[in-house]
Amino acid sequence: MSKKESTFFNMISTLLIITIIAGASLGFVNKITAGPKAKAKLERKIKALKLVLPEFTNNPVADLVLVKSEYAKDSVEIYPALNQNQKVGMAIIGSSKKGFSGLIKLMIGFKQDGTIKNIAVLEQKETPGLGTKMIDEKYVKQYRDKDPSKFNLKVKKDGGEIDALTGATITSRAYSEAVQMAYGEFLKREKAKDK
């Protein structure tokens, strides 16, 4: 038997076949996992809504409002909270791309008077042990029950009232920026309501 000669054409065709099979496999896996990923993302948002909002009886996810914003590339998500048809607050997703490792996405819950009820981190890729401490109670409680119209949300290094995370000032600045962005949207919604 003679050994088949390796040619440039044979190598290209083999590579093309492998690429087509790999691409089809990745597309198939992505299609299969799209539903579970979307469900998990929705469950995280529902859990965050329960954490950051005052007690509510409506379905904030069903009442979601998307608004264009100068602060965000995409629309900003606003979740109104009602209790027995009475507005009790809203949750707004704020974000900043100025984190040490990029995007920080938060859900900020506001009481009806504009004070911050609570904050939940939805996405972040900060340095473990430093920037990831943004979820610690000690850090988050600095924002709770604060009225951003009377409380400077910037870190102390920048003239504000927030103690930055040790070794993670950039993360702290981005976190505060995301909260401030959400508060700006809260104010817009309240002013639009008054008109």
Image: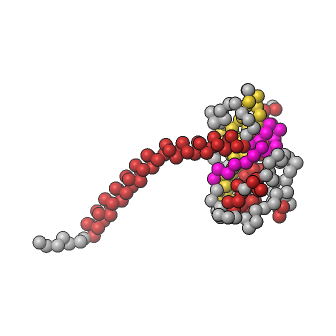
The overriding secondary structure of the stretch rendered in magenta is strand
Q: Residue at x 36, y 59 (%)?
A: 19
The outermost residue toward the left is 1
Instruction: State the quadrant of the C terminus.
Output: top right
Instruction: State the quadrant of the N terminus.
Output: bottom left
Q: Residue at x 43, y 46 (%)?
A: 32
* Residue 168 vs residue 133, the one in the foreground: 133
From the viewer's perspective, is residue 5 above or below residue 46?
Answer: below
Q: Residue at x 85, y 57 (%)?
A: 161
The outermost residue toward the right is 150
Where does residue 142 sit, x and y in percent of width and height? 81, 53
Where does residue 14 sit, x and y in percent of width and height? 29, 63
Where does residue 153 sit, x and y in percent of width and height? 81, 53
* Residue 104 vs residue 48, the one in the foreground: 48
From the viewer's perspective, is residue 63 above or below residue 4?
Answer: above
Let me know if residue 99 appears in the view: no
The outermost residue toward the front is 137
Where does residue 9 sit, x and y in percent of width and height? 26, 66
Q: Quadrant of residue 124?
A: bottom right
Left or right placement of residue 35 versus residue 28 in this view: right
Q: Which residues are magenta?
A: 109-123
Q: Quadrant of residue 99?
A: bottom right
* Residue 160 vs residue 167, the one in the foreground: 167
